[in-house]
Amino acid sequence: MHDRMHGIGSQAPQTPVVADATQITVEIRDFDFSPRDLTVDAGTEVTWVNRDSVPHDATDEKGAWSTGMLKQGASVTLTVDSPGTFRDLCTIHLNMKATLTVVEERL
């Protein structure tokens, strides 16, 4: 519990997700992103929803995009158009990290 108060979260192993859908949701829960390792096609709508009791955001380390601050229950949807690998984190809880890989649209 002490770790969660400081934003460390569980960081339990997760299976990487390769999504074929045109819309996908990333949940922020227990100071963690789920999925933490996500691959989508360019043009996919990715929704981040905060299921925690404290505010979080998801911000690309290089500043390409940000969800802005999300209070409990809030969500934001971004369309990811640019292929690449984006390492994102919560700017409040720096131990919360994830990877979003955007690939050219697969046929």
Image (tube, rainbow, N blue to C red):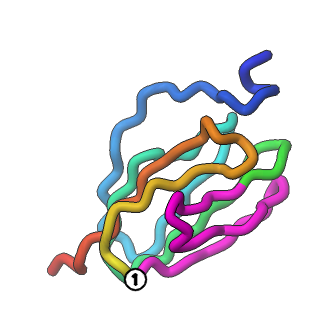
Q: Nearer the viewer, residue 51 or 103?
A: 103
Toward the left, the furthest residue is 107
Q: Residue at x 73, y 32 (%)?
A: 7
Q: Is residue 69 magenta?
A: yes
Position of the N terminus by quadrant: top right
- 14 relative to 28 in the view: left or right: left
Three-letter amino acid code at the position of disc 1: Asp
Q: Is residue 26 magenta?
A: no
Residue 91 placement (x, y as % from top left): 69, 51
Q: Residue at x 68, y 37 (%)?
A: 31
Q: Which residues are magenta?
A: 57-81
Counting other residues with Cα less than 10 Å from the Cα at mark 1, is it few (<14), some (14-19), or many (20 or more)?
Answer: some
- Give the image quarter of residue 63: bottom right
- 86 relative to 46 in the view: left or right: left
- 59 relative to 103 in the view: left or right: right
Identify whether 3 is placed above or below 59. above
Position of the C terminus by quadrant: bottom left
Residue 58 placement (x, y as % from top left): 62, 58
Residue 88 placement (x, y as % from top left): 52, 55
Q: Nearer the viewer, residue 101 or 72?
A: 101
Q: Residue at x 40, y 48 (%)?
A: 37
Q: Nearer the viewer, residue 42 or 107?
A: 42
